Amino acid sequence: MSTVSGPVPATPDHGAPPPADVDASGLPGSPADAVLDLRDVHRTHGTGPAAVHALRGVSLVVRPGELVAVMGPSGSGKSTLLTLAGGLDSPTAGEVRVEGQPLHALDRRGLARLRRRRIGYIFQNLNLIGGLTAVENVALPLELDGTGVRRARRLALAALTEVGLSELGDRFPDQLSGGQQQRVAIARALVGERRLVLADEPTGALDSQTGEAVLRLLRRRIDAGAAGVLVTHEARHAAWADRVVFLRDGVTVDSTAPLVGVETLLAGSGR
Ligand SMILES: Nc1ncnc2c1ncn2[C@@H]1O[C@H](COP(=O)(O)OP(=O)(O)O)[C@@H](O)[C@H]1O
Ligand SMILES: [Mg+2]
C-alpha cells in the first residue's frame, strides 16, 4: 500500500515575520491581521504558597492560514493556554485578543456571542450532548445564536459532510464509534464561519489513520483562512502545523518550524 499524502510542506507564504513595532502597552504591536493575540499572559490558580502558576507570561500571535501546534509535558499549561484563547477562562495578568477584540472588554453576553460565532473549540473529552443526534449537536451553537432551525440543520449537515459523516447525522453519540464522535465534535467546531479553531489533543483517542484524517480536515479549514491552535503530544501531528510552540512549566521554551527539532525538544522534555 502506498503512503497517503503526508503533512503539507511548510508554507513560506504563512511565514512572513511580524511587524516589529511596539504599541502603547510596551508589548510588540498586535499585527492587524492577528486572529489570536496572547500578550504576556499569566494564569495563576490559588494564592500564597499554594498558588499554581499554570502560565507565566506567554505571548503568541496566530494569523489567518496559520496552524500552531502546542507541545509540552503534562501539566505544562497547554490546556490552560487553550481555555484562555477560547475565552473560557481569564488570565490573571496579560491580555487575550481575538480578531483584535480584547476579551476582557466584553461582558458575559458579548463573550458568549464571540465564542459561538467565531471560535470553534474541540475539547479533550468531546463534550457531545448524549440526548441530541449528531446533526443536532452540530446545529446547536448556530441555533443558540439565533439561526433558524432549518438553516442551522442545513449548515450542520454541510459540516458533517465535510468530515465524512453525511449519512450518520441522525445517530446519537452512543450509536457512533469513538472516531465518528470525534468527527462530530470537529464538525461542531467548524460549522458556520469560525475564524479561530482550538483543538486540545483532538486525535488522542483515535487510531492513527483517523487521526491523520482529522488533521487533514483541520488543515483544510485553516488553509481556507481560519487560524488554529492544536495541542498535541505527537510530533507527526505537529508536523501538520506551520509552527510549533513548546511549553514547559508555563513558559514558552522554544518555538520551531515544523519537522525541525521537534523530536529533539521532546527528547529533552522528560516525556
Ligand atoms: N483549576 C485549576 N486549579 C488549580 N490548578 C490547576 C487548575 N487547572 C490547571 N491547574 C494546574 O495548572 C498546571 C497546568 O495545567 P494544564 O494547563 O491542564 O496542563 P497541560 O494541559 O499541559 O497538561 C498544572 O499544574 C495543573 O495542575
Ligand atoms: Mg491538557
Image (tube, grey):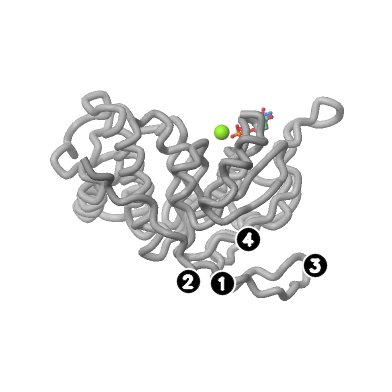
Alpha-carbon span between mark 4 and mark 2? 27 Å
Alpha-carbon span between mark 1 and mark 3? 22 Å
Alpha-carbon span between mark 4 and mark 1? 24 Å
The three-letter code of the residue at mark 4 reads Pro
Residue carrying label 1: 16
Who comes first in sequence, dot 2 or dot 3? 2
Does the residue at mark 4 contact the one at mark 1 (Cβ under 8 Å)? no
Q: Secondary structure at mark 1?
A: loop
Q: Where in the image, quadrant-wise, is ligand 2 located?
A: top right
Q: Is residue 130 left or right of residue 108?
A: left
Q: Is residue 19 left or right of residue 189?
A: right
Residue carrying label 4: 102
Who comes first in sequence, dot 4 or dot 3? 3
Who comes first in sequence, dot 4 or dot 1? 1
Percent of width and height locating residue 168: 17, 37
The three-letter code of the residue at mark 2 reads Asp
The three-letter code of the residue at mark 3 reads Gly
The three-letter code of the residue at mark 1 reads Ala
Q: Is residue 174 above or below residue 73?
A: above
Q: Secondary structure at mark 3?
A: loop
Alpha-carbon span between mark 4 and mark 3? 16 Å
In the image shown, does 224 or 213 lie closer to the viewer? 213
